[in-house]
Image (cartoon, coloured by chain):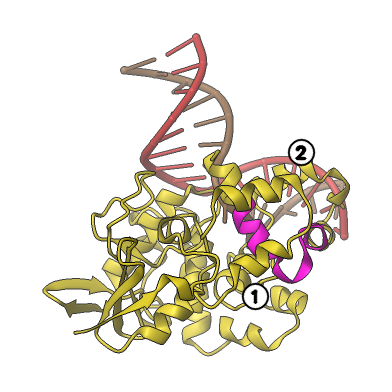
Chain colours: A yellow, B red, C brown
Amino acid sequence: METGTIPLEECVGGLDLYRTLESGQSYLWRRSDGEMYSDSPAPDAWYSTVVDGEVVRARLDEGAGVLEWASTTDADALVRELLCLEDDLEEIVANAPDDPLLEDAYEAHRGMRLVDDPAFGCLISFICSTQMRVSRIHTMVSTLAREYGTPIEFDGETYSAFPTPEELATATEAQLRDLGLGYRAPYVVRTAEMVAGGEAHPEDARDLEYEAARDFLTRFVGVGDKVADCVLLFSLGFDEAVPLDTWLKSAVEEYYPDCDKGSYAATSRAIRERLGGEYAGYAQTYIFHHLRTGD
DNA sequence: CAGCTAAGGGGCGTT
DNA sequence: AACGCCCCTTAGCTG
């Protein structure tokens, strides 16, 4: 076992691990008390995930002023990457457009960061997310990991990696329906088969310009504009992506009515400009969390 | 191409 | 306790 600490002072603008990992961006982490996404924060809890066969655990130690990690490998760089610790939140907030809703959101959830999830797990997570509340999405993704992922022993406990495309492609629609995925079951199987078969990989979108990348991702079954935007924002480093979900649509309706241009693409473009362009995705994450939690 | 609708099932608020 | 409605939407069909 390897362990380490990352000084919180290196995370410019702070780090709120609870809001970063339980705000509906990532479904690939687990909380040690099993109460993740239950609306009951546990400031001392360990969060764990598995990336490329390596277990990573992380915990905030506010008293010591550090983010503590433990892993099967030297995970210092990996933890910084997964939690976007290099993002300068002070600069992002300072450069944000003057906007009452956005300022409230940034103020209320200071320290919440974007995540940088592995692409395949992120893609499947958001295919599962349609018409679903965040706690159930987390349950579904955990179930997929338990049923199809490779178990890994670490520090006396068993962790389940999210399945590889090849592992998930062995699933049948009927099995996934039995696991509670509903109409998403065939989407997950077909997308896993596409990636496993080499037909396309979500990582391929990295090389494209933003809107072309979004179009590219919609070739996967169960992926429309909104899910594609989530994968771009939460996994592929497109910080300008603004997923237009029900909460953002209601925000457009109530706060930015002039940004409603009818189609997804045009409205997305307008709200992206209104929220600051380059880092509009950060703004989206804060507004989404602000409206959803009512905090 | 725009517009409509079906597609799990659980949790939550209302009767 | 039963009921209706909602949930970070997409695919497929119709006109």
Q: In the figure, B11 relative to A164: above or below?
A: above
Q: CA distance from mark 2 to mark 1?
A: 30 Å
Looking at the rendering, the stretch of residues picked out in magenta corresponds to: A271-287
Q: Is residue A185 left or right of residue A36?
A: right
- Chain of residue at mark 1: A
A32 up-or-down from C2: above or below: below
The residue at 72%/85% (across/down) is: A208
- Classify residue A57 by image quadrant: bottom left
SS category of the residue bearing label 1 = helix
Residue shown at 69%/78% (left/top)? A216
- Disc 2 residue type (three-letter): Glu
Answer left or right for A239 relative to A58. right
Residue A276 colored magenta? yes
Judge whether A66 appears above or below A130 on screen. Answer: below
Q: Label 1: which residue? A: A217
Image quarter for residue A237? bottom right
Circle 1 residues within 10 Å: few <14, some 14–19, many ≥20: many
The answer to whether residue A226 of the structure is visible from this angle is no
Q: Position of residue A268 (x, y in %)?
A: 78, 60
Residue at image mark 2: A254
Image quadrant in which the N terminus of chain A is located: bottom left
Q: Earlier in the sequence, mark 2 or mark 1?
A: 1
The x, y position of residue A179, in whole percent, is 33, 57
Image quarter hosting the C terminus of chain A: top right
Task: Give the camera-side residue of A40 and A213.
Answer: A40
Report x, y in % for residue B12. Answer: 43, 30
Was residue A230 drawn as part of the magenta stretch in this picture? Answer: no
